[in-house]
Image: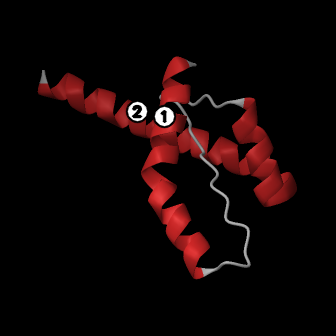
Amino acid sequence: MESREKKQEEKTTKHGPLRWELKQQFPGYDIRQYNIIIDVLGGWSREVDETMKELLGARGGKILLWMQRAVISHTLDITRTLKVMS
């Protein structure tokens, strides 16, 4: 949980200047940032769940599951590579 909160803060800080620049370029638009953070074991927060539903409707849950598989597969590939290297 703490690492998710830390990542949330990092992403918000990192992309803050971009949000500001977009607000300057497009003053009549509502500029929002949605941080989608999936941890190494494929978990995510309820906030991410709600965000995906807001952005993608009913497909949001299915897309999160695809993203989860990608994260876990990537983690397994890294683990295999580290075992081979040691």
| Residue to which mark 2 is pinned | 75
Which quadrant, please, contains the C terminus? top left
Q: In the rendered image of this protein, does residue 84 appear above or below residue 17?
A: above
Percent from the top left, x then y, of residue 35? 59, 46
Q: Residue at x 45, y 39 (%)?
A: 10
| Residue to which mark 1 is pinned | 7
Mark 2 burial class by Cα count in 10 Å: few <14, some 14-19, many 20+? some
Percent from the top left, x then y, of residue 11? 48, 45
Q: Is residue 4 left or right of residue 44?
A: left
Q: Nearer the viewer, residue 39 or 11?
A: 11
Alpha carbon separation for disc pair 1 and 2: 18 Å
Residue 58 visible to an observer of this rendering: yes
Q: In the rendered image of this protein, does residue 12 appear above or below residue 82?
A: below
Q: Tag 2 or tag 1, which sits nearer the N-term?
A: 1
Q: Residue at x 46, y 60 (%)?
A: 17
Q: Residue at x 40, y 33 (%)?
A: 75
The disc at residue 35 is none
Q: Is residue 12 left or right of residue 86?
A: right
